[in-house]
Image (cartoon, rainbow, N blue to C red):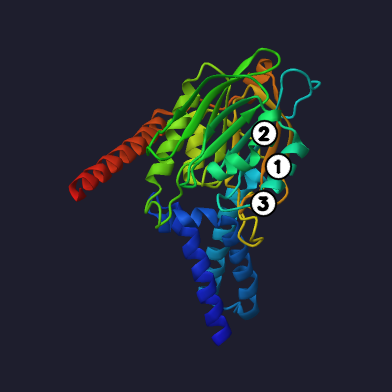
Amino acid sequence: MKLKIFLQVFGAIAVLLTIIPILAVDYWWIRMFDFTHLQLTTLTLIALLAYFIRFDIKSRSDYAFVIVLLACFIYQGYKIQPYTPLASYEVMNSEKPIGDTTLKVFAANVLQKNSEYSSLVREIQNYDADVVLLTETNSEWLKQISSTMDSRYPHAVKVPKDNTYGMLLYSKLPLVNAKVRQLVHDSIPSIHTGVILPSKDTLQLYCIHPTPPMPQENPTSTARDAEMMIIAKLSRSSQLPVIVLGDFNDVAWSRTTELFEKVSGLLDIRKGRGLYNTYNAKNPIMRWPLDHIFVAPDFRYLKMERGKKIGSDHFPVYVELHYEPSGAKVQRPPEVSAEVLDLANRMIREAELEERIKQQELRLEL
């Protein structure tokens, strides 16, 4: 009897943790359960299988409990399914030969306090990407890798910061109209730049690293969500084919990332191919995809890999893309509804209001 009670409590926790992330509330202690979806799926499956140890075929309550657990497991599977080989590709494979419309991208959150500079450099040299984005980079990181990177990448946008939100963007290809913008907070930069391919085609690159919903940084996900929606709207209105990359501090299946994809009109390379979990590199049990590369329908897929450990709590991610605008119509997503756009605008306004209140409180303290 005690075992059965334990299993019921265990299962009830699994059900509760499944329901919590469905709530459209941006408090950190709600949104944190977006991240652990894979672990919750495993927890629910264990609870479901284990419950059969004490299952009473004559008990209605047992039937009801198993049905609830099964419903949770099906829902969790539904959320993960797009990132498995059971789903269709969102970005189709390229069938054209590699040429001057190919783009190779490498991105890594280096972990600011990490000092394994040579490990990162080896990975960068191994992949030999055209564009490299490094986040959580401060002045020490810039100093340690400059001799290698400056010789290989003649074009760069460098925004080192000591607040874990520094960015270094390196490129073998020419950059045009490069700007550093602070979209939500004046301490959180994003890089916006055009990139000229060898074919002379120009694409638009947005590099972001919004703040996570954490009690020591932001008690809500409002700032992160707003930055993602601003970038989504910029992507949607861009006259150039867009690539958005960086550490989103959000998982691929969350409400916010799904909204980002709808508003931006961009595509997720992971869908149909795998999770490519980039975090946590130091804990194999608690892993999920935080580092993303979203692309316009003008691009086709050539290759994607998760890199080796570089001493960071993130793995690097590497992608090869082929620019094929003639095939964009085939994989273009449906038009976004007015309700979805209104929700995105509302999230931006909430962040603006939150920031104004913070500034007023700061002035009162002074």
Residue at far left of view? 364
Q: Amino acid at mark 1?
A: Val
Could you tell whether 319 is left or right of 360 in the image? right
Residue at disc 2, secondary structure? helix
Residue 323 vs 28, above or below: the answer is above
366 or 267, nearer to the observer? 366
Do residues under tags 3 and 1 come within 8 Å of each other at their CB atoms?
no
Could you tell whether 345 is left or right of 58 in the image? left
Q: Quadrant of residue 86?
A: top right
Question: Residue 147, can we see it?
Answer: yes
Residue at far top of view? 200
Residue at the image point whose x is 63% and y is 52% from the top: 115
Dot 2 corresponds to which residue?
149
- Of the image marks 1 and 2, the number of the one nearer the N terminus: 1
Residue at disc 1, secondary structure? helix
Q: Amino acid at mark 3?
A: Glu
Q: Quadrant of residue 198?
A: top right
Give the CA distance from mark 3 to mark 1: 9 Å
Q: Amino acid at mark 2?
A: Met
Dot 1 corresponds to which residue?
121
**Residues packed near mark 3 inside 10 Å, few (<14), some (14 to 19) or many (20 plus):** some
Give the CA distance from mark 3 to mark 2: 15 Å
1 or 251, nearer to the observer? 251
Locate residue 338, reporting x and y percent: 39, 28
Could you tell whether 327 is left or right of 4 in the image? right
**Residues packed near mark 1 inside 10 Å, few (<14), some (14 to 19) or many (20 plus):** some
Q: Which mark is residue 116?
A: 3
- Of the image marks 3 and 1, the number of the one nearer the N terminus: 3
